[in-house]
Amino acid sequence: MKRKTIYKFLCLCLTLLMAASAFMPVKALKSTDTANVTISEIDANYGATVTAYKLINVNLDSNGNPMDPAYKWDNAVADWLSAHEYGDYVSADDNVTDTFEKLEDDSTEIKTLVDDLASAIREGTLTVAPQTSVDVEKGTTEANYTLEMGAYLFLVSDGVKIYAPGFARVYPEYDDEHNQWVLSADTLNISLKSNEPAITKTVNGEGVSVAVGETVTYTVTIDVPQYGETVSDTKKAFVVSDEMASGLTFNDDVRITAKLNDADTDISQYFTLSQEEGKLFVYTAKYDELKAVIGDVTQITLTYTATVNNTAYAAESLLNEAFLTYDVKPYVTAVDLKTKNDTVQSYTYGLEITKQVDTVGDLVNGTQFTLSNAEGTELKFNQKDDYYYLDVNGNATLTVDAAGKIKIHGLDLGTYTLKEIKAPEGYTVPSEVTTIVLTDTAENLGELDAVNVSGPNVKEDGTVIDATYKNQLDLIIMNYKNDFNLPTTGGMGTMIFTVAGILLMGGAVILMVFVLRKKKEQ
């Protein structure tokens, strides 16, 4: 009985407590209540500045309840909306209409409005006092805010990427469980979309070893800058240019294509060609016309060729560089161009052959050689200054100069056969050839890997990689005197040959007599 009494008492207390709680005051929502908002996806390689602009204010009564109407546009924003094609978003007294409030934050209508507002703020045709700016340091990807209730626009500046504006609402929301108004969220994360065009260049499908006379193909792949619809035409910069070194002769054959319907389609007509000092070519896109044709395709390709000429030897003579220029702040009136580049390097190789009459003898001129490739084809050359270079219309004969040398520039990597075809007077022409192998690995491009020469007339320790030109192999080829001369008539040499001949003949006669006698006896 006592236990039941206690149980009833507890139930009564609980009932009274629950009844009393219905009349207990709850924490009222205040317009100064804040939420933590994080703007993410800032490029850590460059950093940026993120600025928040308050577009909409929230009206609460003294009890912390939203008033009717609860949302009101910033005065300047309301005037701008009314003056443009957004009048149905604002009512009398600058209030926010239900037409706008029914829109989802990721809707096309919101995105279009935010783009237009961002453009107007950046262009200065709409002045909205910034709430706060956050500098995002290099190595950091987020900007963090503590913001009161309202709707906000976020703009990124001072980066190299083109960032889309961000939008977020920190609004009150009724909590049925606790019978009170609360913030819709204590934390918000807004991920900003961005676009940083890239440029990639290749040569001969990544090949870097070339020879004089060879046609080199360059392929440049470029991301198309993605400008918003509200960006002015003068700000839609999209320029592609190129610089080519002296060892390359441009063949003036640029082709600009895009992959449309799985086919490489020529789109050169949507670019204007011009010339600038130091530039091989400059192509400026007719941006709107180009976008109308390529649609959602985000890359274009430039393909063109050059011929390696007879000046190509040093590394810098075969350097080629492509450039992409675009506007990094398209919503700002002043032009702010960013140029990105990609460079490719090709290399040629060479030989310096020194002719020596023996291991310690003098250098000689006039000796002649031929050089063949791995297929056994004799290569043809022409001369410029003090060196030979490949020329299909040239001559196959290489002649040692007055300094006792043959210099060959502009060879490709591979295996070569050096053959002597004329020796100095009094010296023999070697019957065997010299094999030369030129190799260069990716670890140290432009420099020969090692000495790789074989042949009986190659001077021992006389083959080295040149100290100045690391792409050149230096070697010494020797000749030896012809010491085999017939003795003079009547000398001891003749007597020896005569006696030997008589003995052989006598032996033959004796052998024949012996054989005939044997047959007769049988």
Image: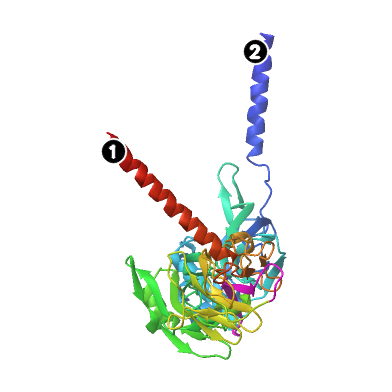
The reply to whether the magenta stretch includes residue 175 is: no
CA separation, marks 2 and 1?
155 Å
Identify whether 495 is placed above or below 266. Answer: above
User: Which mark is in front, 2 or 1?
Assistant: 1
Say how the picture is coloured: rainbow
Please name whichever residue, 89 or 68, is drawn nearer the observer in this view of the structure: 89
Q: Position of residue 86 (x, y in %)?
A: 47, 75
How many other residues sit within 10 Å of disc 2, few (<14), some (14-19) or many (≥20)? few
Direction from residue 85 to residue 3 in the image, left or right: right
Residue 195 x %, y %: 54, 68
Q: Which segment is the magenta one?
A: 333-362
Does any portion of residue 170 appear in the rendered image? no
Instruction: Report if residue 453 is visible in the image.
Output: yes
Give the residue number, with chain letter if any, for mark 1.
519
Q: Identify the disc placed on residue 4.
A: 2
Image quadrant assignment for residue 440:
bottom right
